[in-house]
Amino acid sequence: LTKTTNFFPPLLYQVATGFLDPSNISYPFRKLFKKYPNFHFHMGELIEIRETENKIVLTTGELSYNKLVIATGTQTNFFGNDNIRTAALPMKNIGDAILIKNTILERLEMASRTKDDTERKILTTIVIAGGGPTGVEIAGMLSELKRNIIPGEYPELRNISIDIYLVDGGARLLAPMSAHAQQYTFGALSDMGIILRLGTLVKDFIGDSVTFTDGSEIIAKTLIWSAGVTGSTINGLKPECFGRGHRILVDEYNKVFGTESIFAIGDTALQVSDSGFPGGHPQLAQVAIQQGVKLAKNILADEQGRTLSPFRYHDKGSMAIIGRNKAVADLPKPSLHFKGFLAWLMWLFVHLISLVNYRNKLRTFSSWIVAYLSKDQYLRMIFTPSVLEDHSKGFLNESSKKNI
Ligand SMILES: Cc1cc2nc3c(=O)[nH]c(=O)nc-3n(C[C@H](O)[C@H](O)[C@H](O)COP(=O)(O)OP(=O)(O)OC[C@H]3O[C@@H](n4cnc5c(N)ncnc54)[C@H](O)[C@@H]3O)c2cc1C
């Protein structure tokens, strides 16, 4: 792994908007596994697989394996656009969320100081690309920041219209969810003051100008990028091992095609053998968790000479939160749709119990209670490691610097 902590991506957007502390949704791997004497943690980035030698090469050394499980997830897809990659803010990990929070807070400060109306408008206009759950959830949270916090804490911006755009190339928000969920979300976000632009894709982002495929343009300093993900290239795997979205093709036991002892699970794996999901599984936490459990059982079964069982995804449904008392939930069997307060309670419960330990559950629950009752949270602070401001000190080596 490239980092030392496990974290819970569904709540990243609350870290990005200063409503949750990063430590509420993270936990150190070493502590998580300290009770297992046969578990070893090695921090490093996978550079290459040497299949014939049963070895992997990392940025921090080499490891030998009997069986190799690849669970490298996905990375943000900028669709080959370097302007967007360098200037937009992705939302994929804790570092991204902290960068979004710091950037928004810094730009609000700049907007409060400037005497130039045009500059103030650019600094206070935010475009979110991607109307999936991440885009919807961050739009909802920014709307709460705009309504409940900015008027009280930024008196200089009290009479300014802060524009938050949510843009998606499709005709609907939350594309994988039901039409009930999509319609409700559209109405709820519109009521919350989010400007929705559907059916057009972001084409470029140069010098504060976000341009779209329909020829239109929004002048904004901040573009939050939640428009897609892609698998990553892994040196040592043959090109024919990769399928759509650069995901690794696996059989029904999650074994990588054409290999003997290499497996892939989670977002990075593309498995088309499950009859319910002929195009591959959705890139969701439940798929990753269920594949991990199934693969562990199959590896043990294989060691003990028992029959292996193929992976079948058990879809437990999907949900998205929009804002205070507003969420949507689709349950597959029986087919049920929930919206509003009930779906919001369901969302809170499911996300709270999914956090890794009681400490995180308790701290997140108390943060939510405070935020709900006070319509506020006090985490709007900018922290930047000093080492980033003075690289000459050399406290961190190159490989760890980029993963702070
Ligand atoms: C903002 C956001 C919100 C989400 N919300 C939801 C939700 O509400 N519900 C839901 O079901 N799913 C949600 N997801 C998707 C969910 O997080 C993923 O499906 C799930 O995390 C996939 O698990 P994984 O183990 O395959 O990959 P990941 O959780 O992405 O883990 C991959 C790990 O591999 C490491 N890694 C990558 N490349 C290398 C390398 N070369 N060498 C070493 N280590 C490497 C990464 O650092 C990372 O720690 C969300 C995702 C995001 C980004």
Image (cartoon, rainbow, N blue to C red):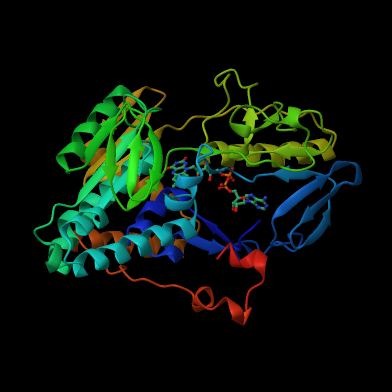
Query: Quick check: 231 above or below 151?
Result: above
Q: Quadrant of the C terminus?
A: bottom right
Q: Is residue 277 left or right of residue 340?
A: right
Image-quadrant location for residue 167: top left
Image quarter where the N terminus lies is bottom right
The percent coordinates of residue 284 (x first, y second) are 50, 38
The residue lying furthest to the right in this view is 53
Residue at 21% in and 45% down: 325
- 185 or 67: nearer the eye? 185
Residue at the far left: name it. 159
Q: At 47% across and 50% down in the image, what residue appears?
A: 9
* Residue 277 visible to an observer of this rendering: yes
Which quarter of the figure has residue 190?
top left
User: Residue pushed farthest bottom?
Assistant: 393
Residue 396 lies in quadrant: bottom right
Question: What percent of the width, then of the height, locates residue 69?
Answer: 73, 44
Establish if 170 lies above or below 58: above
Examine the rendered structure and indicate whether residue 378 appears above or below residue 66: below
* Residue 346 visible, this angle: no
Q: Position of residue 100 (x, y in %)?
A: 38, 58
Total numbered labels: 0
Image coordinates for residue 3, horizontal then vertical, percent: 61, 61
Residue in the picture at 32% in, 58% down: 17
Position of residue 188 in the picture relative to residue 209 (left or right): left
